[in-house]
Amino acid sequence: MKMLMYIVVFVLLFTGCIANKKADSLIQESCKKISKSVLVDTIPHFEKDCIESLKANPESQKARNIDDLIMVGMNNAMSQLSTVKTTVEKIIKEKKYKSSLSKKLLGECLKLYSKSAHMLTSGLNYLKKGNLEKAQYEINDADEAPVFCELKFNGDNQQISPVKKENDLLLTMINIPYMILMEQNL
């Protein structure tokens, strides 16, 4: 009886290791492939960030195909968007901005984040329905928040974005599922 139990435990552990290797391989291959695109070649460390962010999500170890990986990427993007939005709300609430203009720009960024959250949610819903083309458009448009938020601060107004690093990471997180989806649709 004990021997049977040892065999069952061994089989379960062995199966789990094989599944993890498959997921890790899928992540490595996908991130390497999409990082070669001209659309992300200006994003520093894209391949490394892609691999690390997907592996960091425990759901990625259940990924058996590209569709699963896209869903993990979408969840990461939505999580990062929520983190950036919360950070900006905290800066405004605690009055940690440098000027009234910075406060105004941060408020405009919050509106952009809300719009992007709607787009990511819509993209996720399209993915679940199998409408990859509409999902791709929604996800692509969601990257407007970090891009335009940074542009607001980098103009002639002499303001420095207090969330530049967070916006850069958000742009990467949005581009991961977008690029995997785009690669799949080629």
Image (cartoon, rainbow, N blue to C red):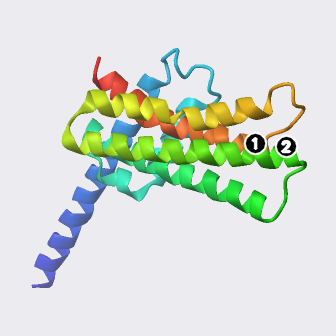
Name the residue beneath numbered marker 1: 105
Q: The disc labelled 1 sits on which kind of residue? A: Leu
Picture coordinates of residue 46, whole percent (x, y): 57, 31
| Residue sitting nearer the eye, 93 or 56 | 93
Picture coordinates of residue 57, whole percent (x, y): 44, 54
Does residue 25 show up?
no
Rate crowding at label 1 as few (under 14), some (14 to 19) or many (20 or more) other CA atoms within 10 Å.
Answer: some
| Vertical order, 86 against 183 (above or below) | below
Residue at position x 48%, y 47% in the image? 117
Locate residue 179 relative to residue 98 in the image: left or right.
left
Q: Secondary structure at mark 2?
A: helix
The quarter of the picture where residue 7 lies is: bottom left
The quarter of the picture where residue 65 lies is: top left
Q: Secondary structure at mark 1?
A: helix
Locate residue 65 relative to residue 115 in the image: left or right.
left
| Residue sitting nearer the eye, 48 or 111 | 111
| Residue sitting nearer the eye, 124 or 22 | 124
Picture coordinates of residue 155, whole percent (x, y): 81, 26
The alpha-carbon separation of the residues under discs 2 and 1 comes to: 6 Å
Name the residue beneath numbered marker 2: 101
Asked whether disc 2 touches disc 1, contact meaning CB atoms under 8 Å apart, the reply is: yes
Residue at position x 62%, y 41% in the image? 169
Q: The disc labelled 2 sits on which kind of residue? A: Leu
